Amino acid sequence: MITVINYFASGFTKKFLCGESFIVGWPEAFSPHSHNLSPAATKLKTRTFPALNGVRLSTMKHATLFRHPTLPTHLPRPLAPDGVKAGFPSPAQDYEEETLDINDYLVRNPTATFYVRVEGDSMDGAGIHHGDILVVDRSITARHGHIVVAFVGSERLVKRLSLSGGKGMLVAANPRYPTIDINPEDPATIWGVVTGKFARIAV
Amino acid sequence: MLALVDCNNFYASCEKLFNPAFKDKPLIVLSNNDGCAVSRSAEAKALGIKMAGAWHKMRDFARQHGVIACSSNYPLYANMSDRVVNVLRDYSPSIEVYSIDESFVDLHGFTHLNLTDYGQHMRQRIARWVGLPVCVGIAPTKTLAKLSNHIAKKQMQYNGVLNLADHSPAEIERIFRNIEVGEVWGVGRCLREKLQIIGISTVAALRSSDPTAIRRRFGVVLERTVRELQGMVCMTLEDAPADKQQIISSRSFGRPVTELSDINEALASYITLACEKLRQQQTVAGSIAIWLETNPFNPKAAQYSRSITIPLPAYSDDTRQLIRVGLWGLMQLYREGFEYKKCGCMLGTITPKLGLDDTLVPSNNTQNERTIAIMDRINRKYGRGTLKSAAEGSNPTWRMRRGNVSPAYTTKWEELMVVK
């Protein structure tokens, strides 16, 4: 992309820093608002000044200044799909697929995804254990049977949501924990829906 | 048409989202060093707590009314802000992120849509996905969108979204007649008083004034504001922000500091931060300015305040080199016997790195460049400050006071929200 620096009004001057690099052209050749060079510009005589140091540009009336397009310093290295080999081409060449990424597996909607850590054994029966990290997606509407993160009073809970006959309950997956009645209409109660879990294993 | 999407009480709302104990409680977020309130929940506003109110003056009042005071948790706010912007990117190809809690969304050409519904959709999606309340102002110009947003926030009947196009000119006139001129974007307190003297005290009055007369009296900036209020676009959407021409990093110390060695550490860490930003935008700096000052609000203490600008022998983005130069500058400024409150640095003469030839950035720096690149990579992966210059010190006592900072819920594995 080329950023338009300025148009010349008469008497315009700008001190240029050593090393600033510009293309100087004429206004009609550039579309003023598009930030892009118009096709006509390619035909134009453009001049690049690699190091304009304090040049008074007021003498160049009607010229338009564009900042030289900056390129990223780290260009992505092109993958050589065939490798660089002199011998027989790989028979797997046409079958290459992306390597697995755990993010793709666990996270559907990164913008709405948060991670939380489990404490205690109230969800042991659902395979959610102390120390596990849960993937919580706020964009999913909680339905009956979903495991949810919920705020009840001043507590942050993870429980299975049970909805029936307009009533809501948070049910633990461990008989030692009581069931909690909630108001399913209160949007503040259900914080998000649990869509995955992961943990590290000490080695 | 464009929309201004602005988060309500942004920092306070972020704090409330992760802590059920804060529900329905008055909550304020304090500035760096827990100095004053920079964000207030609706309940705190209802108690009459003022923006920028000094914390040490309201501590007793806060205790009496059960006000929760949180230190600012910028890693959390930055992450939540990114999420809001991410949601908005689904609504328009062109967005100007105006501040941490406000974005302009270009709705130009979306004539096939009911923009009020579209705004409502954004608002509800941000509330659900990100968990933050926002208001939306929709109008033909930035100034009007800002104003609509303000009205949507204050007046419940709009349900968080005000699209000016939904209202007839007579209705708009009536709405604007009831809003004080100081609420207009760019009209500060000083300007407001001057306008009131000549009888312009409402938005409606400013809008119906003659732009040329305004220009003669107040200058071109306010003229532009008047024209924008009249519906003429004077400020365009800047969706590709220009590189910063100056990078400033400056902070108050957590306590008064007298020793040069402490200030050295603080300055080194500010320069490190500034250099990280410099490299992020792929630029180099040609000069560095350093300043040092005592606390001007403490009338009993002896006052001292100096600054120095040092041109660099060659453009640089090397943290270690800039620290060397910066610390030399600090040595020139420092005088014994003062209680210092603040120091800072500003990188200037900033230029894109690409396109500089070798005489300007000496090429024998490849080794240094690699070192810095590796430091950046390690710090990105394992968190800021994992690898740092020894000049920053290891056990800073000058660090900001952040007495009650919430966990980095979204940026540190060790600080995730805990559920039971």
Image: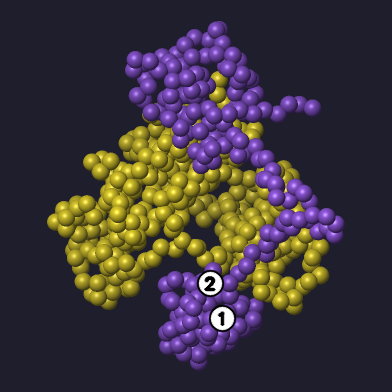
Chain colours: A purple, B yellow
Q: Secondary structure at mark 2?
A: loop
Amino acid type for the residue under numbered disc 1:
Ile
Mark 1 belongs to chain: A
Q: Residue at x 52, y 55 (%)?
A: B296
Q: Which residue is mark 1?
A: A23
Residue B392 percent location from the top left of the image: 72, 51
The residue lying toward the viewer, choosing from B94 and B317, is B94
The residue lying toward the viewer, choosing from B361 and B57, is B361
Compared across the picture, whether B306 is left or right of A79 comes to left
In the picture, the quarter occupied by the C terminus of chain B is top right
Q: How many marks?
A: 2
Q: Which residue is mark 2?
A: A2
Amino acid type for the residue under numbered disc 2:
Ile
Residue B367 percent location from the top left of the image: 81, 63
In the picture, the quarter occupied by the N terminus of chain B is bottom left
Question: In the rendered view, would you say B290 is above or below B359?
Answer: above
